Amino acid sequence: MNLIKIGIIGGTGIYDPRLLENLQTTVQKTPYGDVSVATGSYQGIEAAFIPRHGARHSLPPHLINYRANIMALKQMGVERILATAAVGSIHYDFKPGHFVLADQFLDFTKSRTNTYYEGGSQGVVHCDMTIPYCSDLRQALSQAGSDLGVTVHNGGVYVCTEGPRFETAAEIQMFKLMGGHIVGMTSVPEVVLARELGMCYANVSLVTNFAAGLVTGMLTHSEVLEVMAESLHQVRAVLMGALPYIAAERPCDCARAVPDMDITK
């Protein structure tokens, strides 16, 4: 089998991998657990697909096996990852229905294993995170959004919380004061693990609501799913539309975030 260079991790609502043709499903065995991965192609471009929360949305954000998912893609030869997410907006310019391509994050997770390097045979590694989200992948996604005529904000600070509960109004105000633009529960440690393995990673966030305290009323998960379902065709179109804009060779520095280290060897 040819190595697949592009991986897609589908977040809330993106559970149908039939956006790819010639589908096959394989199970990747990793040191961190087994992962079911769908593979296929789009306009001749091969890609691998993993539903982050499981095929039936059975995994809450804090229990996802992030290390196994990222390692499974690495073992298949994936070099670039496009990951979708449903997020709340902390910034009034980022409205429901808009897309945000995060370029930075604030990590407020609490209990997740967020590294492959835990000492011992893996060694102790301090991974550069100056620019965690690949600028070249973001440019490809931005161009795809422009082609489709949808609103895409190329840049924004993703605040990652532990979940599965939503945030309090006070927490959202704190995140806003700290410079956050959107809030979600999944981008960390995904982006960190991808960077440790020298993979490019881009976050494609769909704003489904304004965060707690920015508008009146309660927020429910069913509302998030409803908005995501309404915009599902656009999410898929942006993802697939970006693939032809991704260059064959990687001009970015993502592969050099951890020099001379390869946890897969």
Image (spheres, grey):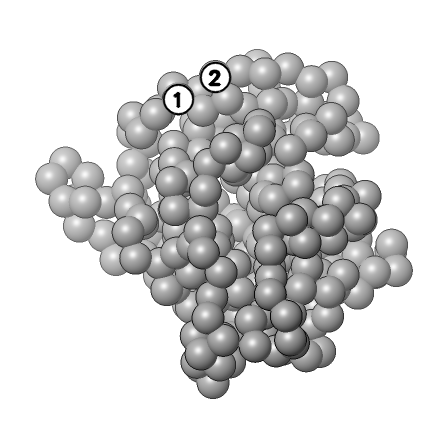
Q: Extreme front residue here?
A: 217
- 83 lies left or right of 71: right
Looking at the figure, which quarter contains the N terminus?
Answer: top right
Q: Residue furthest left?
A: 120
Q: What amino acid is labelled 2 in the image?
A: Val
Q: In the rendering, which numbered label is found on residue 27?
A: 2
Residue 176 seen anywhere in this rendered image of the structure = yes
* Residue at 46% from the left image edge and 71% from the top image edge: 168
* Circle 2/circle 1 CB separation < 8 Å: yes
**Where is residue 81 drawn, in percent x and y?**
56, 43
Looking at the rendered image, the quarter that the C terminus falls into is top left
Q: Is residue 41 left or right of residue 5?
A: right
Name the residue: 38% across, 40% down.
Answer: 63
Label at residue 140:
none
Q: Is residue 50 in sight in this rendering?
A: no
Relative to residue 4, is residue 114 drawn left or right?
left
Residue 35 at x, y percent in the picture: 45, 24
3D distance between C-alphas at marks 2 and 1: 6 Å
Q: Tell which circle, 2 or 1, labels the residue nearer the N-terminal end.
A: 2
On screen, 168 above or below 253? below
State the residue in front, 226 or 152.
226
* Disc 1: which residue: 34
User: Residue at the location (23% across, 45% down)?
Assistant: 117
